[in-house]
Image: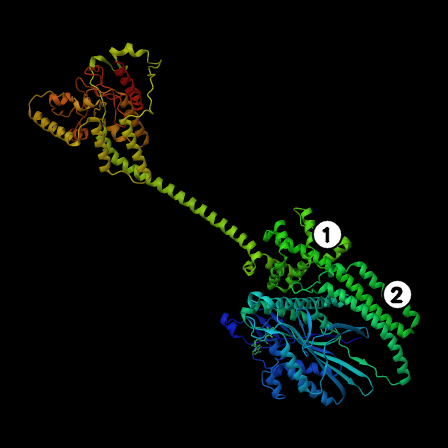
Amino acid sequence: MKQTQNITVAVRIRPALQYELAKTTDISIENEKQHIIMENKQSLKFDLVYGPDSNQQVIAEQLAYPMIEQFINGYSASIMAYGQTSSGKSFTLGVPDQQLYKQFPKMSENVGLIPRAILNFFSSLQQKDVQSIVKVQYIEVYNEQLRDLLTTEQTEIQIRERLVNGYIQIYTTGANEVQVKTAKEALSCFVNGGINRATAATALNQVSSRSHAIFTISLEQIMSNGEILKSKLNLVDLAGSERFSKTHTTGQQFKEMVGINQGLLCLGNVIKVLSDKDSKTKAVHVPYRDSKLTRLLQDSIGGTAKCVFIACVSPSKYNFEESQITLKYAARARNIINKPIRVVERAIQDEAAFAKLHEENEMLKEYIQQMTLKQAQLDQELQNVRSANDPGSVYFSQNGFQQTNNQTFLQINQSPVNMNQTLAMLMNEPQQNSIKEMIEAVSEKVSNIQTYNTKQAGDLYNRLQQLIFKLSPNLNLNQQTLKQLLQNKGQIPQVFGQLTDHSTILFQVSAFLMQFIRFENAYERQLLRNEGQIQFSDAFFGADKPDPNLIQQVLDEVAFTNQLKNELKTAVGFTKADKFDNNRFQTEEIQFTREFVQNQDIINQKIKTRGKEEQQFINETQNQQKVVILDVDEEFQEIQFETDLVVTQRIENDDYDFENFDFINQKSDTEEDLDEDGESQEEYDETEDSPAVDLEKKFMDSLQKQQAIKNPPSIYELSQRLHSLENYFTGKSRQEIEQILQEAEKKKILENSQVNEDENVNVNVSKPAVQQSQKPIVQSVMQEPQMKTKSTPNLPQSSSQLRNSQLAQRVPAQPLRVSQLETKIPQPDLSKNDLEHNTPMNLKQLNRSQSGQPRNTSGYQQLPAVTKSGVKVIQPTDDKVIKIEKKVPQSAQLTRPQLADAESGRGSSRILQRSQKK
Ligand SMILES: Nc1ncnc2c1ncn2[C@@H]1O[C@H](COP(=O)(O)OP(=O)(O)OP(=O)(O)O)[C@@H](O)[C@H]1O
């Protein structure tokens, strides 16, 4: 039963840095004994927690020295620092400072864990007093390439594995291993190698590591029993995860960021799988091979080494989200169980046996070479699948996906089987077993590759589909856009590279998509064929389309985790669309969508505002109209008072059949023109214009307009208009009229002074001016007071006025006879001359000077056709005087039907008609 051990996880919170303090001084993470307290009060437990004031020596003593002890005892060990960029990983492990080397072994306070570990190791080893060989190796994983930091002459570095007692051990070929005898020599390698390491200044870190670096100390101890105890200590300074939005990297640094994030993503996946409780009971696939970093750390995480994981975090609220992710992975890592083993190789004692074995060994070596060759081929295949040759694509080689078809795998698989048979004949049992073991390992590898390949295909299919479906509703990624996307594939790495800004996980999807783009021709053809549908078909998988059931199975397996779903959602869900602003293609889509939505909003807003304005305007207008009507009403009453001009005709009382509203002596002439109801059949063309109609129409129009524009005419304006009307109808100026009235007034006073004056005064004013100009006659009649007060100068009333005016225009010009019908008031004493001239009176003035009821005057009848408008124009009848019959009621009040007739104009038109006929 092998000993198992959980990974030791420590957290180090560094002090807040200047750039963080500039953003916020809020602390989101605090330490408390073994716990981390997050701002949301969540508490996470770790093996060790170091606060911002922790010192380098203590960390080295507590984390590194125990590992060194194990290392010297024959166990392999790893110490790795993990965390976002600028979280203090390099500070914790140690930066390559030349001063450090010069001062060594004296160390300043800030010297990191690796130099202290080196010193401690050599002194411990010295104390152990054992024959040993110490070698150091320093490599970095930069953009998924392995680079040797201990030499400038690069050779290809390969990652290999071997089985030791059934356990996989990882080793590299091609990298320099420098034998060192002293701590200072080892330190020199660390410092010089560190200087070769890729670093760059980013927005968050002046000296940001752009690669994952692994400084390895290998120890071979030759024990007194001849055994060789082999162990390794890996000191791993991982590059920090980065967010594009914070580091603002471009060009090469951007690619580095993508590479870094990809490696970390794979590491996260490995941690996830290993920390899952299923992994303890079931055989699970651990995706070590997904990146060089995880492959190199295979021993350390879930493997045969002891491991300390140092999660570095910032205390600042500004970096809380990143710290949270780091801590989440760190907490998971605590669940990972390693199975540390000591690797002991036996020393050979017997010379003869040694020679024989050597011979056999040589033979085996030959086979191994063949096997290695095969293995290399397989590795290459795998490499082709997983790594891209061009920098834009990280995962896949140019045609790697096509090469790794099932046919190839079958062939590869066949070779070990044949070889197995051959070997079985040649070898003795232990040899056979050893070879068998190797063959099994290779077969397993082949099968792994097969599974991997199928899984990748499924994974790719699944993720791509999800991505596209995810994108399509949000981005409007229709067929056209997708085609464009495919055509502009040069932009794709950036587009999707930027997606990774939000999450390293997205990189995987991006990489898949980039690989997919290689198949764009076939796919595009297919796409065009299937217009309207996004489909994957044979064109995508080629002839080796996997079994659909298998795909389904794989799809189920690789279904997105919730986290990935969320990440995707956030990244492509436009919640942070502004992040893509640098990308033209993406931006256009987004901006278009945004602008469209914004414009829609603006338009909607405008419509709303417009609607409101309209409503407001209507309300205002209505209110205003009310006001105007009221105002006008008041004014109009005044006006009406002045304009209650009814043109009447002097009629002989005996000639007039009042009941029938007929002129007796005209009856026979008019009968034919009346229908059964006695209504006039003659219709007046109301559309026909005359100066009188025109003027009044204009007046009314203007009045209406003024109402509409909320500007009622002033009394002055209205009286001006009235005067124009007066003037128009009488041909006299206002002054003249005033003069006449004054004279009339004077006469009245004179008359009043005369005793026994006849009460009935006829006021007959002839009007030569009108006569000359052939204008219609206008006669003023005092309206009944009740009617006047009821009158409303609104539209209908105006129409009535208009109609009457229209009637007027049909009247031929005649000398005027103006009759003023007033009962009790003393009539103005107009001269005969005046009376003959039919001068209209200003009834307002008259009215004001009179009181009491109107009375009938001999020879003059107040016509019943008095309308609210107060304006009537009827035809005069030459000089002939038409008498009104005596039947006229004293009061000259109209019955209701008569009044209705009068108001509708029927009565007056009938009268008018008869006059005309006459
Ligand atoms: N515990 C600490 N005490 C004081 N300064 C620290 C501490 N940890 C980190 N710093 C400082 O913070 C800055 C960033 O640290 P460091 O370079 O170690 O980060 P990193 O995680 O290695 O970043 P990257 O991943 O970008 O390489 C450095 O200036 C470093 O000196």
Q: Is mark 2 within 8 Å of ligand 1?
A: no
Residue 430 to residue 410: above or below: below
Residue 145 placement (x, y as % from top left):
68, 70
Q: Nearer the viewer, residue 596 or 89?
A: 596
Q: Image check: 400 left or right of 908? A: right
Identify the disc placed on residue 418.
Answer: 2
Amino acid, disc 1: Ala
Q: Quadrant of residue 741?
A: top left
Q: Quadrant of residue 121?
A: bottom right
Q: Image check: 323 left or right of 118? A: left
Residue at the far top: name it: 668
Residue 102 placement (x, y as % from top left):
61, 87
Which element is circle 2 on?
A: helix
Q: Nearer the viewer, residue 205 or 54?
A: 205
Nearer the N terminus, badge 2 or badge 1? 2
Which element is circle 1 on?
A: helix
User: How many numbered marks have been drawn onto this rendered protein structure?
Assistant: 2
Graded by Cα atoms within 10 Å as few (under 14), some (14 to 19) or many (20 or more), the crowding at tag 2 reads few
Is residue 227 among the parts visible in the rendering? Answer: yes
Give the residue number, with chain letter if any, for mark 1: 539
Residue at the far front: name it: 153
